[in-house]
Image (cartoon, grey):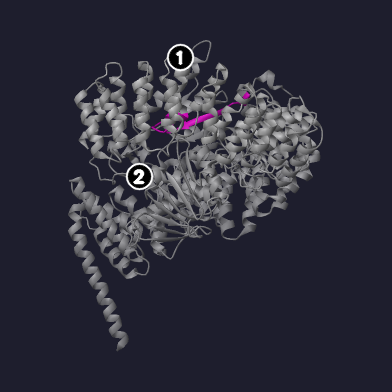
């Protein structure tokens, strides 16, 4: 049974920890005690009332990487919190990073009596952020193909990570990410934020507790992207490090539609940078289905592409026979519909939850029932765990298992044939050529992770 | 003879397949490099599909035939570069032994892009000769970027023979880190030795972690352990030390426990994190480590362990609840919420019921305790003990809507102690339904306090059999007198039913103004459509105070919106009647706003009739647009009829725009 997460209680504990530290800054404290050989003695007692709950020593210093479409909300959250301080922004587009730096500094300046603040650096190369020992944690909000190289570098440099979904570009990357997070003791949160929404958690608890009987079918709505396209070459805009944007992916001439951040297309349409809709919305809804079925450390055993004889909808199947059908219509247009032998659960964003029977929606959880991890805010859960070192709600292993479904669905779609998958060994079965797709060779010099 | 024939047939098929692919490829090649982007895309997809088909399991002859044909074209300098690039990409997916010569030749291409594509294709090629060609290319040297790519490919292919050429790149700043990483993947004794010798190179320590992990994969635990042990030594980078500690703990937790204890109590933050992660991953063994190091651990170590670990033994957290240090005490109390069992319940109840700083943390911890033994202990504590602890136990169980509590609450509600009674009625706000409604009704009748009627309403709100529930409440209601009877009306309005409606309607004629007002309010919340008659009558009564009129209009809107079992036409008819007696424009607008939820010709007719009403035509048009959008899915003809009327009336820019959108469909 997973324990619920209580951010209030966690904050108490963090304050307790911080109360037991000296008032110098966090990294400085560590260095001082190490140098003095004072490891086993207690730092002097500084009451929380002296430091203040959000004193500088309590703050988590943040680096923001990838200042595009998705970063807006994260940036606002990180600059708005009293317990985080954004020290660096990083983007391959000069104008974007300079604008972000100016915005971060303006926010902090507005909170100063002097009305002035300088203290946020702007970088083109993420490696410069990794070199900053004063940065505790990074948010990696780039296109998918940069998630793993940057996150792994961050964890190896001792930083905690919030990485957008899907966590990876390939299955092998996911295994590496999960192993590195575990081995380096990093707190990594994957941005599948539906786990921190009440309705999704409740839906998963209803399924996990068997209240709709044995789940045999699940419908989910991912939508469709337009097909990827070949594009004519355009001049690379001034101030855009296009080579670095492409990074480990194959070279193609520049075209603005290739690199554009766009919910309806842009780079998300291209196989080179992700798994299209399977990676985009699949990373959200497949993730919830995994949670509901209790499959966070496992996954389906078969993937059948849409259009394969006898398969009207893209499908993946779990070992117990439960089938997930992509884009099969759902009742009332809900995002996910779980159908069991004794009832149904339908769930969407904006707290939309329907159940059959209706009383399941409000049925209380008993002491012996499965209580899932409760997080009310995905970013806050990450920050609290960075402080307490508890496990966040969406770990690297969870992100890897979900992304694996996204990638295998995409591989089956591209090869136009079903794939059998062994989730324990993490191997594609009886298809040597399909197995090559479990990783992609990387373009030099962005090769190693 | 038979064997020869079979062989001849197989060869013939292969030739045919080859010839077939050759023709198809020849046809595609000009299009693969077409300047017309759509033509190029189609050709790319066709070739990709050919490769996918040829790579089907069990059809290796096809794969080989296509790869052979593609390899020939890949090296043909007469073919345009974009076409060759896409051809090599397909070899990356399906190429085998038959492609190696061509791809190796391309490693020497003067076109850097083709060269790089060939390297990537060889990296994925299963033939051992692919390694040989990559190694030869590295020996030949090139730009730093090229060498980085080659070293990475050779590293991933675990090529022990590449150690020497890779070692030469350790001394160049541009290639040193990539060389170190490749050596990490190769992880032979020579490669590992080189990494130790070059530990100052950026990334070398992490590459040693990679090497150790590779040794674990190869089941060479001794070599892995030796690397981890050496890496853990002081002076090495903290992150690599942390990784080494985790590696050691995974290989041999007991053997690493001393280092884990040392790291947990140490000042290096990353080592502490790694130690906590190792203890968590070890499960019960991790709990044992904590128990052994606990007596000598300092306050900070204890606080951190209490904050992070879910496999912490309960008794350690319980001991820490009595610590002198306030921070440690809070961490311990919070930890009990995660790891606590029955023994934690009395401690948390005492702290939660007290007035100290620990009160809120203890209450939160109690709410999080889901251990079955702890729940049993809570049940027992609710039934017996000090009053404050009993109250907290009752409210904790009620907050989690603990079903067995319901029967107990009835008993607590009848205890002499008023504090326990109050806790019990507060509990009914969270739990209880059909079974206890009659009893709670009687308890409310016996002592008609606001808390008891609030509890009665909450329980009534959860009943499934409303008819039986209404009868039970009516029994108490009929025994009540005067203003006390009025207190039952909100509950009756939750349950509905004919008998209840009659009781409430009778009161509408009461000479007692307060009773009459309470009855009208109950009617305005009534869940069944027959209440409409009384509400319309009340709204029509021009002698009645304005407040009663307003309550009646709100009740009509409530009925129209919520009585979903009633046909939409009936509900729209009710709104139409109310519109006719509405006394001001504000009420008319409120009534109009309900019509989009009632998709029916009657609603359409009402809206159309008001499109010329100077007072409300704008609201009528906006409601009409929303109704038309709603109707579009179920009755397109009616939706268009309404949209047409909205466009013709053109009283609201927004409504007209939305109506036109519907007409355009």
Task: Give the residue displayed 68% in from the left and 46% down from the top.
Answer: B279
Label 1: which residue?
B546
Crowding around mark 1 (Cα neighbors within 10 Å: few <14, some 14 to 19, many 20+) is few
Q: Which residue carries the number 2 mark?
A: A223
From where the camera sits, is residue B318 visible?
Answer: yes
Across and down, in percent, residue A121 comes to 47, 25
Expressed as whole percent of the image width and height from the top left, the position of residue A424 reads: 53, 58
Residue A190 on image: x %, y %: 50, 41
Q: Chain of mark 2?
A: A
Q: Nearer the viewer, residue B43 or B124?
A: B43
Chain of the residue under the numbered disc 1 shown in the image: B
Q: Is residue B632 left or right of residue A374?
A: left
Tell if the residue under mark 2 belongs to the same chain as the one under mark 1: no
Q: CA distance from mark 2 to mark 1?
A: 53 Å
> On the image, which quarter does residue B94 sit in?
bottom left
Q: Residue at horizontal 38%, vertical 22%?
A: B590
Number of numbered discs on residues? 2
Looking at the picture, tell me which residue is in the foreground, B244 or B523. B523
Which residue is most to the top?
A114
* Residue A328, magenta (yes or no): no
Q: State the residue in front, B134 or A447.
A: A447
Pick the residue in front: B642 or B277: B642
Looking at the image, is B163 positioned above or below residue B416?
A: below
Q: Is residue A64 magenta?
A: yes
Q: Which residues are magenta?
A: A57-74
User: Which type of secondary structure does the marked residue at label 2 adopt?
Assistant: loop
């Amino acid at each position: 049974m997973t324990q619920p997460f209580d951010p209030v209680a966690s904050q108490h504990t963090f304050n307790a920890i911080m109360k037991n530290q000296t008032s110098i800054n966090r990294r400085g404290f560590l260095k001082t005690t190490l140098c003095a050989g004072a490891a086993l003695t207690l730092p002097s007692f500084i009451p929380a009332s002296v430091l203040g709950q959000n004193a500088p020593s309590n703050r988590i210093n943040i680096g923001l990487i990838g200042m595009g479409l998705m970063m807006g909300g994260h940036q606002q959250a990180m600059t708005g919190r009293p317990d985080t301080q954004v020290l660096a922004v990083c983007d391959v587009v000069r104008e974007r990073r300079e604008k972000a730096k100016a915005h971060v500094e303006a926010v902090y300046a507005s909170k100063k009596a002097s009305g002035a603040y300088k203290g946020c650096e702007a970088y083109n190369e993420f490696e410069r952020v990794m070199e900053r020992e004063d940065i505790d944690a990074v948010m990696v909000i780039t296109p998918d193909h940069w998630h793993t190289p940057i996150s792994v570098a961050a964890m190896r440099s001792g930083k905690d990570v919030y990485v957008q979904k899907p966590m990876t570009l390939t299955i092998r990357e996911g295994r590496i990410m999960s192993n590195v997070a575990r081995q380096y003791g990093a707190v990594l949160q994957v941005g599948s934020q539906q786990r921190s929404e009440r309705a999704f958690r409740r839906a998963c608890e209803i399924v996990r507790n068997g209240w709709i009987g044995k789940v045999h079918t699940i419908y989910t709505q991912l939508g469709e992207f337009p097909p990827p396209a070949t594009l004519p070459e355009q001049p690379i805009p001034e101030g855009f490090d296009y080579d670095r944007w492409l990074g480990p992916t194959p070279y193609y001439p520049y075209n603005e539609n290739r690199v554009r951040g766009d919910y309806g297309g842009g780079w998300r349409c291209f196989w080179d940078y992700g798994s299209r809709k399977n990676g985009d919305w699949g990373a959200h809804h497949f993730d919830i289905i995994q949670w509901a079925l209790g499959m966070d450390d496992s996954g389906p055993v078969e993937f059948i592409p849409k259009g394969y004889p006898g398969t009207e909808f893209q499908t993946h199947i779990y070992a117990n026979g439960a089938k997930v059908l992509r884009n099969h219509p759902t009742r009332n247009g809900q995002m996910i519909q779980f159908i069991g032998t004794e009832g149904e659960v339908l769930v969407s964003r904006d707290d939309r939850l329907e159940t059959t029977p209706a009383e399941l929606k409000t049925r209380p959880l008993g002491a012996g029932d499965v209580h899932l991890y409760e997080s009310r805010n995905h970013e806050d859960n990450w920050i609290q765990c960075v402080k307490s070192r508890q496990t966040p709600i969406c770990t690297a292993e969870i992100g890897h298992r979900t992304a694996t479904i996204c990638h295998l669905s995409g591989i089956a779609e591209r090869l136009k044939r079903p794939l059998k998958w062994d989730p324990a060994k993490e191997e594609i079965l009886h298809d040597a050529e399909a197995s090559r797709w479990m990783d992609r060779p990387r373009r030099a010099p962005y090769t190693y992770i | 003879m038979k064997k020869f024939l079979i062989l001849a047939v197989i060869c013939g098929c292969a030739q045919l397949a080859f010839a077939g692919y050759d023709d198809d490829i020849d046809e595609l090649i000009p299009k693969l490099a077409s300047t017309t982007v759509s033509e190029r895309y189609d050709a790319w997809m066709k070739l990709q599909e050919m490769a996918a088909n040829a790579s089907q399991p069990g059809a290796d002859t096809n794969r080989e035939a296509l790869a052979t044909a593609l390899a020939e074209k890949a090296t043909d300098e007469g073919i345009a570069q974009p076409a060759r690039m896409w051809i090599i990409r397909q070899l990356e997916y399906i190429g085998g032994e038959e492609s190696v010569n061509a791809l190796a030749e391309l490693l020497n291409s003067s076109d850097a892009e083709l060269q790089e594509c060939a390297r990537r294709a060889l990296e994925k090629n299963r033939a051992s000769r692919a390694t040989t060609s990559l190694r030869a290319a590295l020996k030949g040297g090139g730009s730093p970027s090229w060498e980085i790519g080659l070293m990475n490919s050779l590293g991933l292919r675990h090529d022990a023979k590449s150690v020497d050429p890779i070692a030469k790149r350790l001394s160049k700043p541009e290639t040193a880190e990539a060389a170190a990483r490749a050596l990490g993947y190769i992880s032979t004794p020579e490669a590992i030795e080189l990494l130790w010798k070059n530990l100052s190179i950026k990334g070398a320590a992490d590459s040693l972690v990679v090497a150790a992990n590779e040794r674990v994969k190869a089941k060479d635990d001794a070599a892995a352990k030796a690397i981890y042990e050496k890496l853990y030594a002081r002076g090495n980078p903290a992150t690599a030390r942390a990784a080494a500690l985790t590696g050691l703990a995974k290989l041999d937790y007991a053997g690493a426990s001393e280092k884990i204890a040392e790291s947990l109590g140490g000042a290096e933050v990353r080592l502490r994190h790694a130690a906590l992660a190792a203890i968590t991953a070890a499960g019960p063994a991790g709990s044992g480590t904590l128990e052994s190091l606990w007596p000598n651990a300092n306050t900070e170590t204890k606080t951190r362990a209490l904050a992070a670990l879910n496999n912490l033994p309960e008794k350690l957290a319980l001991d820490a609840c009595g610590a002198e240090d306030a921070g440690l005490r809070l961490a311990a109390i919070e930890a009990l919420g995660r790891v606590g069992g029955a023994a934690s319940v009395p401690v948390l109840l005492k702290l939660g019921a007290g007035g100290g700083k620990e009160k809120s943390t203890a209450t939160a911890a109690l709410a999080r305790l889901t251990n079955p033994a702890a729940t049993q202990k809570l049940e027992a504590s609710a039934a017996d003990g000090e009053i404050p602890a009993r109250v907290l136990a009752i409210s904790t169980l009620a907050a989690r809507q603990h079903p067995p509590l319901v029967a107990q609450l009835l008993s607590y509600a009848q205890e002499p102690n008023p504090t326990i009674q109050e806790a019990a009625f507060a509990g009914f706000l969270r739990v209880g339904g059909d079974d206890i409604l009659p009893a709670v009704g009687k308890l409310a009748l016996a002592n008609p306090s606001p808390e008891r009627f609030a509890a009665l309403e909450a329980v009534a709100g959860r009943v499934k059999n409303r008819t039986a529930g209404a009868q039970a409440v009516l029994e108490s209601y009929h025994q009540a007198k005067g203003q006390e009877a009025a207190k039952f009306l909100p509950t009756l309005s939750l349950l509905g039913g004919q008998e209840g409606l009659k009781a409430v309607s009778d009161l509408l004629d009461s000479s007692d103004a307060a009773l009459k007002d309470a009855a009208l309010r109950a009617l305005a919340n009534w869940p069944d459509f027959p209440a409409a008659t009384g509400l319309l009558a009340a709204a029509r009564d021009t002698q009645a105070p304005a407040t009663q009129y307003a309550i009646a209009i709100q009740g009509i809107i409530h009925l129209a919106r919520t009585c979903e079992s009633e046909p939409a036409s009936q509900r729209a008819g009710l709104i139409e009647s109310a519109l006719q007696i509405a006394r001001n424009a504000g009420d008319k607008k409120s009534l109009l706003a309900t019509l989009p939820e009632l998709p029916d010709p009657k609603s359409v007719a009402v809206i159309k009739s008001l499109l010329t009403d100077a007072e409300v035509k704008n609201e009528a048009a906006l409601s009409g647009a929303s109704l038309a959008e709603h109707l579009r899915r179920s009755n397109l003809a009616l939706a268009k009829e309404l949209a047409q009327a909205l466009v013709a009336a053109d009283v609201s820019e927004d409504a007209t725009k939305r109506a036109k959108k519907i007409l355009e469909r």
